[in-house]
Image (tube, rainbow, N blue to C red):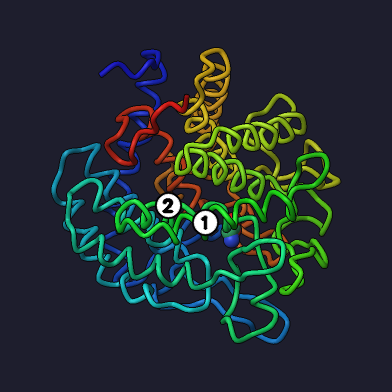
Amino acid sequence: MSTGLSAGQRTQFTSALDLLASKLLEDEARIGITFPYVTEPSGAWALMPASVSAGYSDTGWSHGNWFCGFWVGLLVAAGLHTRSDAYFGLARERMRLVTQRTDDPNTHDIGFIFESSALRLLHATGDLAQADIAMTAAQRLRARTIVTARGAYLSSWGPLDDARARAASAIDTMTNLPLLYWAAGHSGDESFLLAAEAHAKTTRAGMVRDDWSTWHAVEYDTRSGARRRGYTFQGYADESHWSRGQGWAILGFAATAAATGNADYIDIAAHLFDAYRRCLGDNPIPPWDFDDPRGAAAPRDSSAGAVVANGLLRMADLTPDAAQAARWRGFALTTLEALCREALATDPRHRGLLRHGVYSMPQGIGTDSAVLFGDYFFTTALMRVLYPGAFVAADQKLS
Ligand code: GLY
């Protein structure tokens, strides 16, 4: 199949996946039953068991292990790339550890966890046991729906008997929606689609500023649906433009367009991308937050670039406008080339695939690191362009 890549891009992207495949095997021999999440300054992975759930401690919020599914997804991608069954065997073993999170009642992140693991295994191998696992998680995620007078949204963080949790919604949730979209198609139960699309509509109304930048988090009035305040947990400031959050929104609205067949959501993703592009300058790898006062000297977040590249590739596949598709795909490929050139972790002391990601600057976790979601979304974008349809379903053009 023609993938429309230049020979140079094909070589560069293939080498990145080769590197991933060899590092995964090396790390599998070292990590026991724990999962990598960010690299330490030494380059070694910091590790945590899959079982660590999210929760409040006093006023702080801990995300827990929302990374574990990404490791499974990376193993599946490596299996497809190398055509070696060894990776699928490892992925299935890892799923035994990840599956315990299907009933986690504390977090929207079960969307990330099971879309990147069970659904990748299902898609690549046809193993229907993975569909059952993903359906259980999707029911948990749908149960986070909060219905207000203005519409519904998914609560992001915390147990639902906690008033703080019921009121909280984060921009990251937009990229947890694909699990619900898949569940609707798989089960024929449209309530998964209704919940996810309602969340997307509420996010458009409540989390996007007039200049099309996004708040990281919003506290809603759970009765009226009015926004009480916009704030940040991982960005520079409550009113700042956090680049990865913008990426989650772009990718989530592209996924919503694909699931609903409604091109209006591509227009929303396009406006969000234009706002991101305007802030970017010449380097396609964004600063971690566009409002960091260090400006061009602010640390970059490679993971944000990888997330946005996925959004653009989906938008390009979905839009019937050929010229627009070429621009979006072109920018996605430029971003992937820059990531290969400037962020690939070729030094064996540095674990992970992509250096220079930022997990959480305010909390001081993984501030210039490989971050597992960055590796996953980078790999997903590479798989989209090198092996269309093999790792993630290809999008059909909307009319
Ligand atoms: N909590 C999702 C993120 O770090 O982007």
Of residue 322 and residue 192, the one placed in the foreground of this image is 192
Q: Is residue 181 left or right of residue 201?
A: left
Please tell me which residue is depicted at 27% across the width and 49% down the height of the picture. 76
Tell me which corner region of the image, top left, top right, bottom left or bottom right, holds residue 383. Answer: top left
Please tell me which residue is depicted at 73% across the width and 82% down the height of the picture. 59
Q: Is residue 13 left or right of residue 284?
A: left
Which corner quadrant of the figure contains ligand 1?
A: bottom right
Tell me which corner region of the image, top left, top right, bottom left or bottom right, holds residue 220. Answer: bottom right
Q: Is residue 38 left or right of residue 272?
A: left
Numbered tag placed on residue 196 in the rendering: 1
- The spot of residue 73 in percent (x, y) is 33, 52
**Distance Cα–Cα, label 1 vs label 2:** 7 Å
Of residue 171 and residue 10, the one placed in the foreground of this image is 171
Q: Earlier in the sequence, mark 1 or mark 2?
A: 2
- Quadrant location, the N terminus: top left
> Vertical placement of 184 versus 11: above or below?
below
Please tell me which residue is depicted at 56% across the width and 12% down the height of the picture. 323
Residue 27 in view (yes/no) = no
Taking the view exactly as shown, the residue that stands out farthest to the left is 85
> Vertical placement of 280 versus 162: above or below?
above
Of residue 59 and residue 299, the one placed in the foreground of this image is 59
The residue singled out by tag 2 in the image is 181
Q: Please say if the residues under marks 1 and 2 sit with CB atoms less than 8 Å apart.
A: yes
Q: Is residue 308 left or right of residue 364?
A: left
Please tell me which residue is depicted at 52% across the width and 77% down the height of the picture. 106
Three-letter amino acid code at disc 1?
Ala
- The spot of residue 238 in percent (x, y) is 82, 59
Three-letter amino acid code at disc 2?
Tyr
